[in-house]
Amino acid sequence: MVPRESRKTHSVNKAALYQEQQRDDLVRQHADLVKRIAHHLKGRLPASVQVDDLIQAGMIGLLEALKNYDQSKGAAFETYAGIRIRGAMLDELRRGDWSPRSVHQQSRRVAEAIKTVEQQTGRDAQDAEVAAKLEMGLTEYHQLIATLNSGRIIGIEDLGVSEDALNPEWQGQESTPFHDMSQEQFQQSLVDAIKTLPEREALVLSLYYDDELNLREIGDVLSVSESRVCQIHSQAMHRLKARLQSWQD
């Protein structure tokens, strides 16, 4: 007869083995999600960033998602995992931020110039007007925008709020009524700001973030070059930064 303690230990080991197998199965099932997010993010990063490094960071994010996922919160695992995978990649990139201080300063200058022009004119700032405010030629301004976009990550997650604020389907363990209300208010402000963007800029953001097309695919849709899509995306993000400045102060 097998002792009771031995039977209990055997049951615990069996349950642990089953949980480990379930985890391994989920990792294999979502490995393609990690690769898809990595290649999507790589589309707006310098050539010096290796997609394999993004995938490695993303796999760590996936394992963290498996560890912390709580089905009772209401979000599908893939939704939650996608947030954590992307967040892990961005965290890794920010830890090794290659951008000199001047890049960050120039990015702020562009956003401030856009805000000033739009306050003065009461309409969307034109490229030539922003260039004039920055005291540079239009070609030089376009080159600056291209440099800023290739020099650092410019994306929705860089508007000065947390990743969770951009994904209301999942709220963290430490949510409070004030925190939840703040996130909802930011969500609404972001939606409203995107609606005010010039049509082409709003379309590029929609194709990139909602439809998850890469820059080349968006270029095919708009019949423009990949570099032009990159420029439009960067311009849209700087315009959003200008219009959402109150959330970054």
Image (spheres, rainbow, N blue to C red):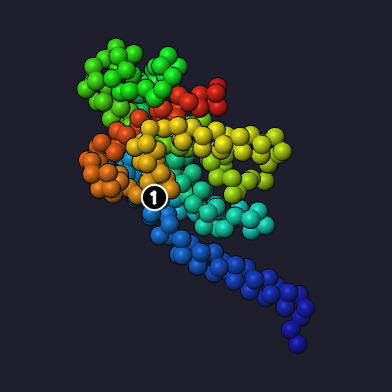
Compared across the picture, whether 106 is left or right of 193 comes to left
The answer to whether any part of residue 70 appears in the image is no
Q: Which residue is mark 1?
A: 212
In this rendering, position of residue 47 left or right of residue 248: left
User: How far from the left and from the top, in percent, is residue 134?
Assistant: 32, 14
In the displayed structure, would residue 104 be above or below residue 81?
above
Q: Amino acid at mark 1?
A: Glu
From the top left corner, tell me how far across and down residue 119 is, in percent. 45, 17
Q: Nearer the viewer, residue 1 or 20?
A: 20
Instruction: Residue at 55%, 58% (x, y): give it.
Output: 77
Residue 73, position as x, y percentages in the image: 65, 53
Q: In this image, 86 relative to 152: left or right?
A: right
Q: Position of residue 56 (x, y in %)?
A: 41, 51
Q: Residue at x 42, y 36 (%)?
A: 155
Q: Nearer the viewer, residue 125 or 30?
A: 125
Other-residue count near label 1 (Cα within 10 Å), few / some / many at <14 / 14–19 / ≥20: some
**Is residue 65 visible to the viewer in this orientation of the structure?**
yes
